[in-house]
Image (cartoon, helix red, strand yellow):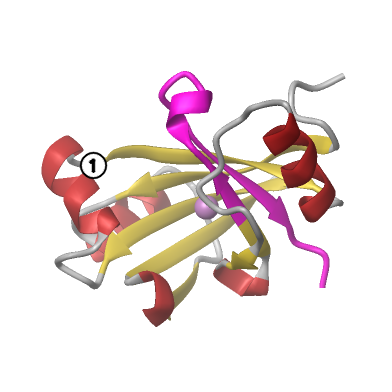
Amino acid sequence: MTSIPGALGLHHVGIVVDDLDAAMAQYALLGFQDPERFVMESQGIEAVTYRTGAGYVELIHPTDPEGPIARFLAKRGNTVHHMAMRVDDLEGTLARLAADGVRLIDASPRTGAHGWRIAFLHPESCNGVLIELVDDRQ
Ligand code: CO
């Protein structure tokens, strides 16, 4: 039983960093291996993912100085940005959550890192935490 209908567990944790190279050096020191690094122009970010067990750690750095990640970084500094839950019916989960009165940021899925289909729930409905839903099946 999970709190989000259809959720299949934790998928990743997203962490905002001001210096991606420095953060990668730190994560290497912590033993994280095989980073996958890529730029996502549409979201104004550069990201690095590390697989860890069934899930991932996702480092996020803003490439758009006016974007939401840059604003988050200016306000909060290097810290956890969001947590993501794995789902296998993203549209259905979003519809059920909306029907239950959960505030959504994305009413319909968009494309995230690695081509994953993602959607965000509003922190107002999640005790102040930004929650992402991910369907990573290709
Ligand atoms: Co994410």
Q: Position of residue 63 (x, y in %)?
A: 24, 72
Q: Is residue 133 magenta?
A: yes
The stretch drawn in magenta includes residue 15? no
Q: Is the residue marked by circle 1 packed among few (<14), some (14-19), or many (20+) residues within 10 Å?
A: some
74 over 9 or under it: above or below:
below
Residues 116 and 67: in front is 67
| Residue position for label 1 | 78
Magenta range: 119-138
Where does the image place residue 73, in percent across and percent down from the top left?
Answer: 19, 47
Residue 6 in percent (x, y) is at: 85, 37
Q: Provide the secondary structure element on which disc 1 rests.
A: loop
Which quadrant would residue 70 be assigned to in this image?
bottom left
Which residue lies at the image location 55% right of the left edge and 66% below the top edge?
A: 34
- Name the quadrant of the N terminus: top right
Q: Residue at x 75, y 29 (%)?
A: 4
Answer with left or right where residue 93 lies relative to residue 23: right
Can you give x and y, in whole percent of width and height, for residue 62 in the image?
26, 64
Amino acid at the residue labelled 1: Asn
Up the image or down, 86 lies above or below 9; here it is: below
Q: Which residue is drawn at the image coordinates 17% and 40% (left, top)?
A: 77
Left or right of 138 in this view: 62: left
| In-front residue for pair 57/28 | 57
Q: In the picture shown, does residue 59 fall above or below 84?
A: below
* Disc 1 CB within 8 Å of nearest ligand 1 atom: no
Q: Quadrant of the C terminus?
A: bottom right
| Residue 125 seen in this snapshot | yes
